[in-house]
Image: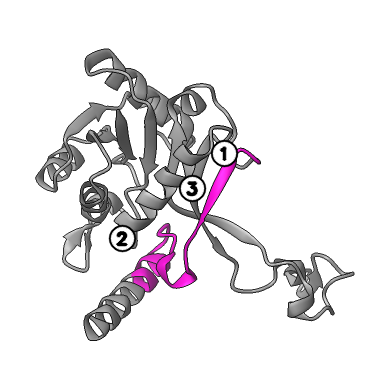
Amino acid sequence: MKVAVIPARGGSKRIVGKNIRDFVGKPLIGYSIEAALRSNLFDDVVVSTDSAQIAEVALQYGATRIIQRPSELANDHIGTFPVVKHAVGEYEETVGKADYVCCVYATAPFLSAEKLTEGLHKLKADQHKRFAFSVTTFPFPIQRAIKLDQGGVTPVQPDMIGMRSQDLEECFHDAGQFYWGTRDAWMGNFPTFAPHSIPIILPRYLVQDIDTPEDWRRAELMYRAYCETESHEG
């Protein structure tokens, strides 16, 4: 079986109620649930949460199962892996074994069914791979980064600060949308950022972290512009 696990705790502090806050006319988590359902890849779309309100909204938007997350897995310091492992363990106790598990973030309004499908197909095509997840490019060469230092600025890599952009290797970062993995990769705590992972490359205009009010505003502007462009081109 193929299972989507959407972690969505209720204690967001920087953006209160982030997972179910209205984002361009819909609760934010609704976009992730609907993209997962639209892909037709999953036997179940599971939401792991400690919040009854999030659970209610998730079911309204089509989540097929809610897994109650214990308090020890619902604080600011818990990473994604233990939450997914708990959800998979609970799922397998009540439903059956999951062969492939996709962690889908609840804060991914640009998530597409097409990229979810690409990730699964590439993972299944190579038996030596354990994960496939979304990445995108940095908009500026990270080798030419600077840091603030005693009222001035200092290059992070002084030997590269004067190099031309085209002479520097392009670098990528985690796009924070989805993480396909085999069941054994998740349960065995295999590292995500490793040679056994497949990058699914997204354009930068479809990637925006949503951690602060500024992020939220930028994401809404990007989403509205993207939808307007799509409607004109369609």
Q: Residue at x 60, y 67 (%)?
A: 138
Q: Residue at x 79, y 76 (%)?
A: 167
Kind of residue at disc 3: Phe
Would residue 156 appear left or right of 187 to someone viewing this image?
right
Kind of residue at disc 1: Thr
Residue 111 location (% of width, % of height): 34, 57
- Crowding around mark 1 (Cα neighbors within 10 Å: few <14, some 14 to 19, many 20+) is some
Q: Residue 192 bears which disc, if any?
A: 1
Q: Residue at x 31, y 41 (%)?
A: 8
Q: How many angstroms separate mark 2 from mark 1 (CA)?
A: 22 Å
Numbered disc 1: secondary structure: loop
Kind of residue at disc 2: Pro
Q: Residue 133 bears which disc, if any?
A: 3
Q: Is residue 78 visible?
A: no
Q: Which residues are magenta?
A: 195-219
Mark 3 or mark 1, earlier in chain: 3
Q: Report the mark closest to the observer, 2 or 1.
A: 1
* Residue 197 drawn in magenta: yes
Q: Residue 109 bears which disc, if any?
A: 2
Q: Quadrant of residue 232?
A: bottom left
Q: How many angstroms separate mark 3 from mark 1 (CA)?
A: 9 Å
Q: Are marks 2 and 1 in contact (CB under 8 Å)?
A: no
- Crowding around mark 3 (Cα neighbors within 10 Å: few <14, some 14 to 19, many 20+) is many
Mark 2 or mark 3, earlier in chain: 2
Q: Residue at x 22, y 18 (%)?
A: 95
Numbered disc 3: secondary structure: strand
